[in-house]
Image: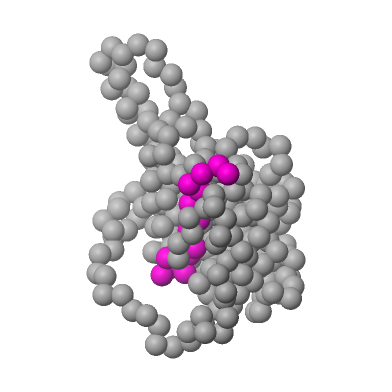
Amino acid sequence: MDLNQSCLVYDNLPKTTAQLAPWNGDEPFQAALKLIQGRSLLDVPRLWTLWNAVRQVEKINPGSGGHVLEVGIYRGGSAVILAKAIGSILQRREIYAGVREWMGEESIQKPANPKLYLADTFEGLVDTGYNDNAHHNGDFKVDEAEVRTFLQKHAPEATILKGRFPETFMGMGGELRLVHCDVDTYESTFAVIKYTTPLLLVGGMIIVDDFGFVTCMGAAKAVSEFWSDNRLVCTYNLTGQAILTKVRSS
């Protein structure tokens, strides 16, 4: 896909007449949302897309242990949304297992629990370059200690990986069910997609948060270079997110 100047729309943006806002009726999501006020640059529809993706991917292989990975955690807001979504899955699994046990079904195998990995340099953006049109190294730098304290309180089960991705993730093991990529730049976005695609379960998703934003043309370019990858079905959500769904292993 060729991303050129004709793809940029600064005004007269396409408007939708859709009026359904399912996040308003999702009480567990609303409860999680209250925990993260001021801690994410993502708007509510984008956060709900992440929340819903975690739950939808559970349909691929119920009970599987495919993990969730976020690269670029900023102040921890979207990480908590992901953590609470995983928690809702585990709660449903426990209820289902209890019902099966009550019905006397034998050989109940406890499913592997998905883990949440959170990767960040805590130094802001890195590897900005020629393909990046607005951001610079160090943008979005945060107070690491403050973020860790927040996550310890609201997502204590998460594993924080400090440093450059993918080096920090190597050796973690296991497949992935969902990847949230929020790194803004060409080099970092390309690295996330390239490294995680082979690790995705078939049906798993990579959600690139920066695809639709004029300040992140590097990230958009990186995504476009995987548009012809036969392993991935790539769609563009008018929230600005690109959603790459793995449909085959090769």
Examine the structure image and report whether residue 137 is included in the region drawn in magenta. no
Q: Residue furthest bottom?
A: 11
Q: In this view, does 173 lie above or below 163?
A: above
Quarter occupied by residue 4? bottom right
The image shows residue 20 at horizontal and vertical percentages of 25, 64
Q: Which residue sits at x=38%, y=46%?
A: 56
Q: Which residue sits at x=56%, y=60%?
A: 228
Quarter occupied by residue 219? bottom right
Q: In this view, does 53 lie above or below 133?
A: above
Compare residues 43 and 193 and report the one nearer the observer. 193
The colour scheme used to paint the residues is: one colour
What secondary structure prevails in the magenta region? loop
Examine the structure image and report whether residue 242 is included in the region drawn in magenta. yes
Q: In this view, does 4 lie above or below 224?
A: below
The image shows residue 59 at horizontal and vertical percentages of 38, 39
Compare residues 179 and 98 and report the one nearer the observer. 179
Residue 40 visible from this viewpoint: no
What span is in magenta?
Answer: 237-250
The image shows residue 178 at horizontal and vertical percentages of 51, 47
In the picture, measured across the screen, residue 197 lies left or right of residue 93, that is right
Residue 72 visible from this viewpoint: yes
Q: In this view, does 116 lie above or below 234?
A: above
Q: Which residue sits at x=32%, y=58%?
A: 23
Compare residues 38 and 3 and report the one nearer the observer. 3
The image shows residue 51 at horizontal and vertical percentages of 41, 52
